[in-house]
Amino acid sequence: MGVGSKRLAGATPANLAEMREWIGWRVDDVNGSSIGRLNDVIEDESGRPGWLAINELRFGEGRRFIAPAREATGSRGRVWLPIDRAVVRGSAELGNPLRSPQAERRLRAYYGVGVRRAA
């Protein structure tokens, strides 16, 4: 489990198609505080949801956050992450996992989801 996260007992993770339907939905943290809006779902090397790209709710140029997709749940126009908002906001400086393997390793270490093994 990552920093500040809690897993829902018995929860089944959504698949990539389901999560892509959530794009545009508001994203809330473990306490129900708003983080931003879901901008994209980034798939992992096996085609499953790997990361959520979240845009901060601000006029103009807001920051972009990256959070692990594996524990996210969505319903009625809202995505819920079992991670504290401050932790998700801290990901803004770690990079986009699509841009470099180093950025993905930093994100995995930050959230405690392991580091991808070399092929």
Image (tube, rainbow, N blue to C red):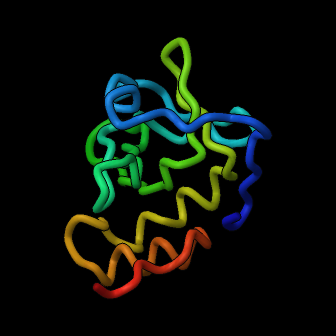
Q: Horizontal and vertical percent for residue 98?
A: 23, 64
Q: Which residue is depicted at the point 31% across and 57% down?
A: 46
In the image, residue 83 sits, relative to residue 96, either above or below, namely: above
In the image, residue 32 sits, relative to residue 21, either above or below, namely: below
Q: Which residue is depicted at the point 74% across and 60% down?
A: 4
* Count of residue discs: 0
Q: Quarter of the image holding residue 13?
A: top right
Q: Horizontal and vertical percent for residue 48?
A: 36, 48
In the image, residue 102 sits, relative to residue 82, either above or below, namely: below
Which quadrant is the C terminus positioned in? Answer: bottom left
In the image, residue 10 sits, relative to residue 110, either above or below, namely: above
Work out which residue is located at the far bottom of the displayed protein and give it.
118
Work out which residue is located at the far left of the displayed protein and give it.
99
Q: Horizontal and vertical percent for residue 22?
A: 39, 26
Decide if residue 40 is on the left or right side of residue 74. left
Q: Horizontal and vertical percent for residue 57?
A: 43, 36
Of residues 15 and 66, the one drawn nearer to the viewer in this rendering:
15
Decide if residue 12 is on the left or right side of residue 96. right
Q: Which residue is depicted at the point 42% across and 35% down?
A: 15
Decide if residue 78 is on the left or right side of residue 118. right
Which quadrant is the N terminus positioned in? Answer: bottom right
Q: Which residue is depicted at the point 62% across and 61% down?
A: 87
Work out which residue is located at the far top of the displayed protein and give it.
76
Decide if residue 113 is on the left or right side of residue 30. left
